Each structure stands twice: as structure tokens, then as C-alpha cells.
Amino acid sequence: MNELMRRMLFLPEQGSAYARQVDRLHYFVISMTMVGFVGVAATVLWFVIRYRRRAEGEPTPTIEPRPIHEVLFVGGPLALFLVWFAIGYPLYVRLQTPPRDAMDVYVMGKKWMWKFAYPGGPNDMDDLHVPAGRPVRLLITSRDVIHSFYMPAFRLKQDAVPGRYAETWFQADKPGRYEIFCAEYCGLGHSAMLGTLVVMEPEKFDAWMTEARRSPAVAAAQDTPDAAANPVATLARQGRNLAVEYGCMKCHSVDGTRHIGPSWLDLYLRKEPLEGGGTVVADEGYLTESMMDPGAKVVKGFAPVMPTFQGRIPGPEVAAIVEFIKTLRTDAVHPAPTPGRAYEPVPGFDPTRSR
Ligand code: CUA
């Protein structure tokens, strides 16, 4: 049934359980719409015949519907729409809440290509490598204009907006190659803004990751003498240097000391009370927002004195700084499982060295 409908509707293959669920909703909506269409058309036809003008000068009858008709007319479609919502909303929630053990990949759109960065691993252009059967969380941003990251086989589409991180996730069923498109018109090269999702056997992926970490580019980004033997989070290390370069360390401590701004130690996923009431969880989205629009949500007890870094820090560097903040944990040696932890924790990271 699934296969028949999929072919009839010319849908691409289904790369994940989520894709099949989205399709089931799609089939349901489209079948109901077709049933509705046939019903309306048949009624129109019947009325045309039943209420046709039979004689010259015949008066048009006034028809008063009974209350039950009104109720059915309003209640029927309403019930149908509510069923769609009841199926669709949990799907949406599922897409918005990546599993805790998901592997992170940073995705950056720029005119006109996709760039992928693995915490603790390599950067890659156009090809996104992931293991089959494991959840992968994507943190998506853009370097210039609005793009949209689109993987039809996974029924997954997420806008890439400059200065912001949007997250989404997927879990591929089996190894294979799938298309990645940009689904937001972004200029001349929009249609050429293509990528490939390469889903690998988990063991092959691990081998690929180990190999990629040994590559000269990754090794060069690491400042340990035996970088190849001791893979560390390159993004986080890059982030530490950038945080110093951009002057973040003048106001934020990394050892828990209170300074002009909140300390970065254990900041990631901390629940912060806000000036003017409410709380916020310091996830990737909030950390990015705080760099771009620091006045938007000021932590209680701190003055809104931070300047904006909108347009001053490019997307990948924001990602690096966020990754750095994520490594700053009191329990860094044995990090608690947190949503979207880095692919591997930074071993032996010493926060005092960055000051
Ligand atoms: Cu990027 Cu269209």
C-alpha cells in the first residue's frame, strides 16, 4: 500500500522511519481531499439536475437548512482537520526534539554550497557523511543569505538563516547516497547548490571518522604534539582561540567566576533566570542569539552591556565558540549525557590555558 501510494504520488524513496510517517499523513490528507473533491463534485452535479429550472418564470424556492445540517457542515471538516493535527503535531514535535544520544554535525549554507563540520572531526564540503541507524542532529546556519537545507528522501527541510542556529535531526535506515538540495531561492547558483548525503555502515563511518581525524588539515588545527594519536575537538579548540580573539574572555570567565557577563563554565543547557521574568535554557540557539542580539534575553543580575556580534563573527566561528562553551563543564572528564553532546568529549581540556 505504502509503495503503491508512493509511486502514484511520485515521491522520492523513504530514507527513514520519519519519512514513512510523514508519507502516511500525506496519503491520508490527499485521500481525504480526493474523497472531498468527489463528494463536492457529485453534490454539484446532483443539484444541477435536481434544482434545474423547469419552466419559464418558475420562482426559485427558498431553502432553510435545519440546524443539524449546519452542525454537520461545520463539525465534519473541523473534526477532519483536528485528526490531521493529531497526526501531524506529534511528528513535528518529534522532529524538533533530537534524541539525547544524537551525533552533532554543523551545517552551513553559503552561496552556493553546503559545508559540514563535525565536532572533533573534519570539515567537509558538499558531502555529508553519517552512520546508518544512529541519530544525527544537524545544527543549521547560513553565512550569507537565507538558504534551506532539504533532503527529500528524509522529508526533512530546514531554513538556514544567518546569525541563527536551527536544529533538526534524522536517522537513516540503511547505507546509501541521497540528494541534498537548497530549497530557498538564494541567487544565481541556487539550483547548483547541491550536496550528497553519504550514509555509511556504522563501522565504516567510525573508520572514516578516525581516518579523517588523522588528515593533515585536522591535525594542524590541533595544538597537541601528538594530534593524530590524540583526537580532540578541533572546533572547540578553534573556538577557544576565537573567544580570546573577539574579546569574549574580558567579560566571561571559564572557571565559574562571576564577571561582567555570566561565566561560561557549565553554561551549556543551564537554566538561566532572565531580567524581566522567565527562564531560558542555554542551548545552541540561545547562545547564538546572545552573540547576535545580546539585549534580547539578558540573564538576571547582569547589565545589558554586551555589544552585538551580528555581522562580525561568521557562522562557522559562532559554531566553534558554541562548541567551546559546550566543553566547559565541571565534569568535563566524564561528561553527563546531554542532548547533542559532541561526537566525543574533549579529553584533558584545561580551561585555565585560555586566559
Ligand atoms: Cu541556497 Cu538556494
Image (tube, rainbow, N blue to C red):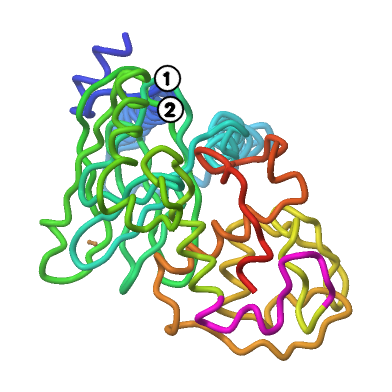
Residue 284 x, y percent position in the rendering? 59, 58
- Circle 1 is placed at which residue position? 133
Nearer to us in this view, 1 or 110: 110
Residue 122 x, y percent position in the rendering? 33, 47
213 to 244, vertically: above or below:
above
Residue 96 x, y percent position in the rendering? 56, 43
Secondary structure of the residue carrying tag 2 is: strand
The circle on residue 52 is none
Which residue occupies 34% across, 68% down?
A: 146
Residues drawn in magenta:
244-258
Instruction: Tell me: 160 left or right of 308.
Output: left
Image quadrant assignment for residue 19: top left
Q: Badge 1, how many Cα within 10 Å: few under 14, some, many 20+?
A: some
CA distance for labels 2 and 1? 6 Å
Residue extending farthest front: 225
The answer to whether residue 73 of the structure is visible from this angle is: no
Which residue occupies 48% across, 42% down?
A: 104
The three-letter amino acid code for the residue at tag 2 is Gln
Instruction: Tell me: 16 left or right of 52.
Output: right
Dominant secondary structure of the residues highlighted in magenta in the image: loop
The image shows a total of numbered marks equal to 2
Secondary structure of the residue carrying tag 1 is: loop
- Circle 2 is placed at which residue position? 171
Which residue occupies 84% across, 75% down?
A: 258
- Magenta residue check for 114: no
153 to 245, vertically: above or below:
above
- Ligand 1 falls in which quarter? bottom left
Nearer to us in this view, 219 or 4: 219
Which residue occupies 61% across, 89% down?
A: 307
Q: Tell me, yes or no, whether the two marked residues, 2 and 1, touch with CB atoms within 8 Å.
A: yes
